Amino acid sequence: MEEELLELIKEIQSNRRMVSFDEAATKQAVILRLLARLGWSPFNIDEIHPEYSVGGKKVDYTLRYKNYNKVFVEVKKVGEDLEKHQEQLLNYSFQEGVKLAILTNGITWWFYLPLHEGSWEQRKFYTIVVYDQEAEEITQKFVDFLSKENVISGKSIENAEKIYTGKQKENLIKNTISKRYYMLKMARIWNRCL
């Protein structure tokens, strides 16, 4: 699986036509091909259900196992401002109790843990930019988060949680260091004034 996925990632990276794809072309040429390489069957709606209805609206794909929604994937055309669609996707995910959600235009992939607290940005735990990262790294992250085996076993959520927790710790350290630096700077200024 990984070797075929790696070849597909390299093909996508070399195909600069993608920047002209509309949403439908992105779904057909990128999303469904990637999901197939990750073990999902694009022809089985019990695995990949297109245009899944959530409260009268639709999410592009839900990856399912035993009639449970495991992952929501929302696809936009290249050039579309993904930030405008975060709230919608995360609300869908929250309503359905879906633990992993992806917003993508085929080139940029934003991975979320939608049931966590915080802003949309805080729930985003990983980003893939196909043209900016090494094909091997991209392949590994797709396997970690989206392979059928990892989604079904719950390993994809474990992998996501590790990255999310590491990111939260990193942010806490940065904030703590920034506050201490600010306090030291203010103390020096105060001492000069005395």
Image (cartoon, rainbow, N blue to C red):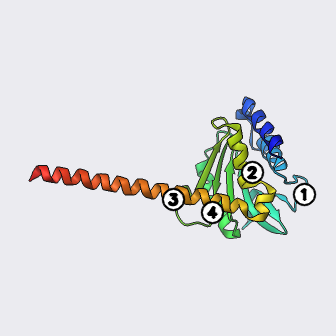
Q: How many marks?
A: 4
Q: CA distance from mark 4 to mark 2?
A: 20 Å
**Which residue position is annotated with label 4?**
114
Q: In the image, what residue occupies the spot 71% across and 55% down?
A: 145
Q: Residues within 10 Å of mark 4 (few under 14, many from 20)?
A: many
Horizontal and vertical percent position of residue 188? 19, 50
The residue sitting at 44% across, 58% down in the picture is 172
Q: State the image coordinates of residue 34 (x, y, percent, origin top left).
A: 79, 46
Residue 42: give x, y in percent of width and height.
87, 52
Q: What residue is shown with label 3?
A: 168
Distance from Cα at disc 1 to Cα at disc 3: 37 Å
Give how far apart the Cα atoms at labels 2 and 3 are: 23 Å
Where on the picture, by quarter, is residue 150?
bottom right
**Label 1 close to label 4 by CB (< 8 Å):** no
Q: Is residue 33 above or below residue 113?
A: above
**Does 67 appear above or below 4?**
below
Is 139 left or right of 181, judged from the image as shown?
A: right
The residue under label 1 is 44
Question: In the image, what residue type sits under mark 3?
Answer: Gln
Give the side of residue 25 with respect to residue 112, left or right.
Answer: right
